[in-house]
């Protein structure tokens, strides 16, 4: 920023819809943890939060990468990282998210649906349980092309993926997206929503986001959605 200066003009997806991109609605569905899931989440969160808070008090300007490097050098730090991973894995596909996703798939059975997960393990679980074709980094390019062509022709009505659909592929027109989980923040969210916004006459896409109450997902989901908000700015 010191070399090139501040932002002069910026557009978000929300600025482009209706003219260059299809219009869309975002529906946030809040879900709850079961008692067992809540106990596991609370236990893991306490282990991680205690270690991370102590680290930031000692080094308030340190980055997340600094914490990971430092934590890996001690048994306590490694426990904190393991607890952080456990909490993330738990939230990736909870019982309530499974039920909500099933309901949405049933509701939009005639639409072309993209399901986005936080990791490949969740994508494969959803593929098995709901009989939705997975599209992951484990699948080679020829098979990916076959899957996308079948989706384009309407032979497949749904695809589930963690990151492969985010960018770099020509994804056929879709009507509905369900964000089951994410891990890369605002940019990832914008890329995912953008997969629905190929314009066509009268099109209005639907984006569902599943967010677990009283967890870190609430704040993460709010920050992710900022990339969709109208935010023209000029500093001349």
Image (cartoon, rainbow, N blue to C red):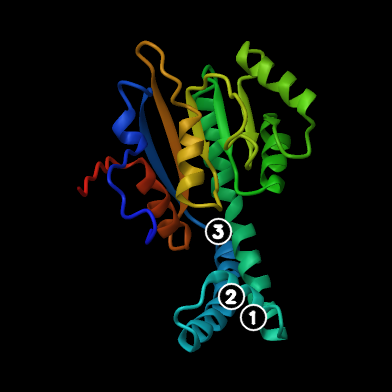
In the image, taking residue 110 as reference, residue 15 lies left or right, namely left
The mark lying in front, picked from 3 and 2, is 2
Residue at 35% x, 32% y: name it: 25
Q: Earlier in the sequence, mark 3 or mark 1?
A: 3
> Is 41 placed above or below 165 here?
below
Alpha carbon separation for disc pair 3 and 2: 34 Å
Instruction: Return the residue nearer the eye: 180 or 139.
Output: 139
Residue at the disc numbered 2: 66
Sequence order check, earlier mark of 3 and 2: 3
Which residue was labeled with disc 1?
70
Given the current orientation, which residue lies at the most extreme bottom position? 58
Assess disc 3: are there few (<14), some (14-19) or many (≥20) residues with their C-alpha within 10 Å of its C-alpha.
few
Kindly identify which residue carries mark 3. 34
Vertical placement of 10 versus 36: above or below? Answer: above
> Where residue 175 sits: x, y (%)?
47, 22
Q: Compute the Cα span from label 1 to label 2.
A: 6 Å
Helix, strand or loop for disc 1? helix
In the rendered image, the vertical position of residue 84 relative to residue 218, given as above or below: below
């Amino acid at each position: 920023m010191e070399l090139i200066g501040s932002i002069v003009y910026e557009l978000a997806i929300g600025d482009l819809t209706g003219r260059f991109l299809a219009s869309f609605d975002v529906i946030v569905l809040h879900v709850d943890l079961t008692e067992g899931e809540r106990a596991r989440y609370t236990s893991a969160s306490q282990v991680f939060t205690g270690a991370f808070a102590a680290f930031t008090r000692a080094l308030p300007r340190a980055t997340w990468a600094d914490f990971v490097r430092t934590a890996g050098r001690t048994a306590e730090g490694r426990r904190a990282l393991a607890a952080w991973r456990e909490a993330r894995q738990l939230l990736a596909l909870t019982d309530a998210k499974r039920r909500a996703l099933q309901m949405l798939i049933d509701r939009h059975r005639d639409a072309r649906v993209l399901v986005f997960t936080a990791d490949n393990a969740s994508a494969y679980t959803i593929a098995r349980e709901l009989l939705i074709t997975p599209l992951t980094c484990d699948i080679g390019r020829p098979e990916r092309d076959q899957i996308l062509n079948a989706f384009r022709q309407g032979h497949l009505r749904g695809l589930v993926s963690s990151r492969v659909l985010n960018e770099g592929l020509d994804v056929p027109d879709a009507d509905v997206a369900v964000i089951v989980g994410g891990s890369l923040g605002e940019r990832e969210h914008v890329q995912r929503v953008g997969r629905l916004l190929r314009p066509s006459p009268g099109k209005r896409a639907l984006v569902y986001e599943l967010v677990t109450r009283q967890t870190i997902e609430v704040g993460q989901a709010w920050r992710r959605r900022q990339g969709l908000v109208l935010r023209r700015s000029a500093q001349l």
